[in-house]
Image: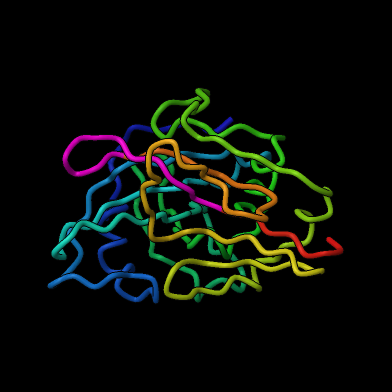
Amino acid sequence: MAVIHHTALKPTKLELLTSWLPSRPWYLAGAGDPDLAKAGGFRLDDPEGEVGIEFLVVTDSSGSLPATYLVPLTYRGAPLDGAEHALVGTMEHGVLGRRWAYDGCHDPVLVAQLSALIKGRVQAQDQNTSDMPDPEVTRSFSGDDRALMDFTTTSAADDHAGTELSAPHGTTLRLRRVLRSAPDNAPLLPPHAAGHVAGSWQMPAGTRARGLFVVLHTGPTA
């Protein structure tokens, strides 16, 4: 179980993301630097208790319309070998000391636990409270367990809409970095999808939105 420490971070997560987000191909550029606010998210537990795993939702109000992003992050007590390209930045944690923050799509611990979440083997955890499941995060999975066994962080590729991880037999795991609110009563799961993760976040006007975070598609022989 991950323990949530309510302590100071220097720089803060939002300060790190203010510098990092504009370098992403899926970032919708505003008039200047991002103007970020935390809008939601959830956590997953590392079975080894070493890596912090957070799916952070942030809203950027710098453009003509607010844009909401899903940012999976991992927090480590030492650099992750071979992941220099995925480093978001370093922070000083008031309890744990220096932490290395990574784009979690390139961290094998996050990818493994995300797969376990989709399969229903672990629960999403509240972002701010230790040992408390987050009931707003939903998931589904239909198909062969092999479809979620072979994702590698080296396959993670960004485009204008998100990040896609691939596995053998045509299986793909797509993280929707730019979040869209689903219309009321509309089905969340796209046609032919084999699994998903969905959640809720806070809109700038104070209302709650809900939409897809992750979609799994399996190939014909997966």
Image spot of residue 8 (x, y percent): 28, 41
Q: What stretch is highlighted in magenta?
A: 202-214
Left or right side of 216 for 102: left
Image spot of residue 199 (x, y percent): 45, 39
Toward the top, the furthest residue is 132
Image spot of residue 139 (x, y percent): 60, 39
Please name whichever residue, 12 or 140, is drawn nearer the observer in this view of the structure.
Answer: 140
Residue 83 placement: quadrant: bottom right
Left or right side of 86 for 192: right
Vertical placement of residue 187 versus 179, above or below: above
Residue 142 lies in the magenta-colored region = no
Residue 62 placement: quadrant: bottom left
Left or right side of 16 for 77: right
Work out which quarter of the rendered image holds the C terminus and state it.
bottom right
Vertical placement of residue 65 versus 120, above or below: below
Q: Tell me, what colour scheme is on the image?
A: rainbow
Residue 209 lies in the magenta-colored region = yes
Q: Is the magenta stretch mostly helix, strand or loop?
A: strand
Work out which quarter of the rendered image holds the N terminus and state it.
top right
Give the total number of marks visible in the rendering: 0
Residue at coordinates 65% horizontally, 46% vertically from top-left? 113
Residue at coordinates 65% horizontally, 73% vertically from top-left? 154
Image spot of residue 198 (x, y percent): 50, 42
